[in-house]
Image (cartoon, grey):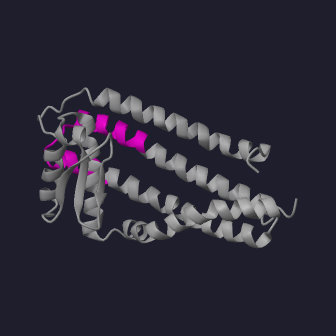
Amino acid sequence: MFIDPLYIIMILPAFALSIYAQIKVKASYSKYSKIPTSSGISGAKAARMILNAEGITDVGIEISRGFLTDHYDPRVKVLRLSERVYMDKSLASVGIAAHEVGHAIQHARGYLPLMARSALVPISMLGSNLAWPLLIIGFIFMSKTFITAGILFFSLAVLFQIVTLPVEFNASFRALKALPAAGILSGEEVTGVRHILSSAAMTYVAAAATALLQLLYFLLRAGILGGDE
């Protein structure tokens, strides 16, 4: 199964997109991390300004270890920014921080896709952990039961990837709207941030495309789509 030419043919486009997306993200971050904000505002300060402008006062901001480990934790209402994003006064840092604040705004406003994604986290983790062992066993022993179970569990992981797309795109939309509204960035600076966030969004698109193509492959090989081999 792992050297099946059909698998390689189907996954290759998504794999290429993933590589391209990673290159774009690194290039965008490298470029805009060198351009300071005209306002001299850091990522952490920008995050707090946007939260205050949105009337959100119960979200904390902390430094997170690692490179670009930025995320919003809805369980404890904490925005965790990597050290560079937290401290730096660059367009890249402010843009990334604003994107993560976008998730905090989603949480505060009860944005349905975010709620759905949060609910899917434990289910998708279970699906990811069980899908591959079941599929491997199923295809080795040609067990329809194991293959079907593996596909069902894998579908949960795919669903998580799909639900993630509107969550990430919406967070970027909110960030791009909030930055000029709060007086943090000018119009030209927002354009730079848009490039960064668009590049980052491509990684989520690539992940979803890869998951969907893998699912399609399993359905084809199982004979669920297109009939039996």
Most foreground residue, 192 or 123: 123
In the rendered structure, the answer to whether residue 221 lies left or right of residue 76 reads right
Task: Please check the rendered image and state whether residue 182 is part of the magenta-colored stretch, yes or no.
Answer: yes
Count of numbered tags? 0
Residue 23 place in picture, x, y as percent: 47, 32
Residue 87 place in picture, x, y as percent: 17, 39
Q: Residue at x 12, y 58 (%)?
A: 52
- The image quadrant that residue 192 belongs to is top left
- The image quadrant that residue 37 belongs to is top left
Reply above or below: 120 against 93: below
Q: Residue at x 19, y 45 (%)?
A: 180
Residue 226 place in picture, x, y as percent: 82, 61
Reply above or below: 11 against 163: above
Q: Residue at x 78, y 43 (%)?
A: 5
Residue 150 place in picture, x, y as percent: 67, 66
Span shown in magenta:
174-200
Most foreground residue, 65 or 218: 65
Farthest-out residue, right: 229
Magenta segment, prevailing SS (helix, strand or loop): helix
In the rendered structure, the answer to whether residue 66 lies left or right of residue 154 reads left
- The image quadrant that residue 116 belongs to is bottom left
Q: Quadrant of the C terminus?
A: bottom right
Q: Residue at x 29, y 68 (%)?
A: 75
In the rendered structure, the answer to whether residue 176 lies left or right of residue 122 reads left
